């Protein structure tokens, strides 16, 4: 039996050298015979809880405290002879780190499927950081640390990250509209998600001090489709863009020289007519208006689907303007020869020559007969 165990009192204090310990127990292995009168020093960023006879006793704030147990120096040792000189009055002190633990990581392990209003079903990954602190030391010890001698952020980070991801999945499932609006909503989403997580953290004696969403990203193939869409939004005139790219490619091929450059230039030259033909087909899809009924029809239509008027003019009567079949010598409407030019109308008052069919003179305004 050493003199230390018989006489000297303990001086209990703890420094977190790693910066990651939420809790540290003294003695570090098992419990001890903390003596009556032992001195406990608690720093400003700490709280201490003494467990005596298996139960949580007093909680100590910053300062120097004198501990009171049933272990009286020398006397307790003498009285513990039936237990192999080991006192049954066991005691231990848990130091709890009250500082804010920052830069803890959270993120989805596997992509989660969501319905996007524009892209349909997409699978998303999300990542971010969060900060925690202990606000109820006794509850934290009883629910998480238990009888462990040390408890660090590494032991709780993964579990809390899964809780965050679970709540995020619920939140996105309820509020997600489209991926295109997400980047502008990260702050609002983080604040709403933080409110949902308060109860999950408090039941362990913890507080979610802060939460940040760094990214919410779709798979690479969806991201590529979004990039293509944004490029198309920037390009105003696709026809000019294609011509410019083709011209630049031909210029680079010419500068490269040699057989490879010549072959590439020839291939581009053969591709150019096809590209322009495609542009012409695109232009042919433009809508026009029927000259008879005014309805919108395709530019390549031969007849108006609404009134039946022939749209492709091969031959026209010079007198009344009716569309004629090639080879007709007389107009089926007015009976005049197909090539007979209409006779202008001469005003009897001012001798002004007016267009055929005019009802009023363009020179004097007189009504024409």
Image: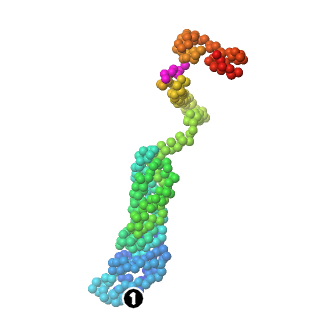
In-front residue for pair 260/267: 267
Residue found at x 40% / y 64%: 199
**Can residue 266 be seen here?**
no
Tell me: residue 107, above or below residue 26. Answer: above
**Can residue 46 be seen here?**
yes
- Quadrant holding the N terminus: bottom left
Residue found at x 43% / y 50%: 124
| Magenta-span inclusion, residue 205 | no
In-front residue for pair 3/126: 126
In-front residue for pair 82/22: 22
> What segment carries the magenta color?
307-314
Q: How far across and how far down the image is residue 299, in percent?
A: 52, 26
Tell me: residue 173, above or below residue 41. Answer: above
Q: For the residue carrying disc 1, how many other residues have a C-alpha within 10 Å: few (<14), some (14-19), or many (20+)?
A: few
- Quadrant holding the C terminus: top right
Residue found at x 44% / y 83%: 65
Image-based side of 184 in relation to 123, left or right: right
The residue to which callout 1 is attached is 7
Q: How far across and how far down the image is residue 54, in percent?
A: 33, 78
């Amino acid at each position: 039996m050493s003199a230390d165990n018989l006489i000297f009192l303990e001086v209990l204090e703890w420094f977190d050298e790693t910066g990651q310990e939420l809790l540290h127990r003294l003695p570090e292995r098992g419990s001890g015979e903390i003596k009556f009168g032992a001195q406990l020093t608690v720093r400003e960023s700490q709280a201490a809880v003494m467990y005596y006879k298996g139960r949580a006793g007093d909680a100590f704030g910053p300062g120097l405290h004198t501990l009171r147990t049933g272990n009286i120096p020398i006397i307790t040792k003498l009285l513990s002879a039936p237990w192999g000189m080991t006192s049954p009055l066991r005691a231990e002190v848990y130091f709890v780190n009250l500082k804010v633990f920052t830069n803890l990581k959270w993120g989805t392990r596997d992509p989660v499927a969501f319905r996007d209003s524009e892209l349909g079903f997409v699978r998303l990954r999300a990542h971010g950081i969060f900060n925690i602190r202990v606000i109820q030391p006794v509850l934290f010890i009883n629910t998480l640390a238990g009888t462990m001698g040390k408890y660090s952020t590494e032991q709780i980070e993964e579990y809390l990250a899964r809780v965050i991801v679970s709540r995020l999945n619920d939140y996105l499932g309820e509020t997600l509209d489209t991926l295109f609006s997400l980047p502008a909503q990260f702050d609002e989403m983080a604040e709403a998600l933080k409110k949902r997580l308060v109860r999950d953290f408090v039941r362990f004696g913890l507080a979610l001090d802060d939460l940040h969403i760094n990214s919410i990203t779709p798979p690479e193939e969806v991201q590529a489709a979004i990039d293509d869409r944004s490029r198309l939004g920037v390009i105003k005139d696709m026809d000019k863009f294609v011509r410019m790219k083709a011209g630049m490619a031909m210029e680079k091929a010419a500068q490269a020289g040699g057989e490879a450059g010549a072959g590439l230039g020839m291939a581009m030259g053969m591709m150019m007519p096809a590209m322009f033909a495609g542009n012409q087909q695109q232009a042919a899809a433009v809508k026009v208006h029927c000259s008879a009924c005014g309805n919108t029809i395709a530019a390549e239509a031969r007849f108006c689907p609404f009134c039946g008027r022939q749209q492709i003019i091969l031959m026209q009567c010079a007198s009344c303007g009716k569309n004629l079949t090639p080879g007709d010598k007389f107009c089926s409407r007015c009976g005049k020869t197909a090539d007979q030019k209409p006779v202008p109308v001469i005003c009897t008052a001012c001798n002004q020559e007016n267009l055929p069919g005019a009802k009023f003179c363009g020179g004097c305004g007189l009504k024409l007969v």
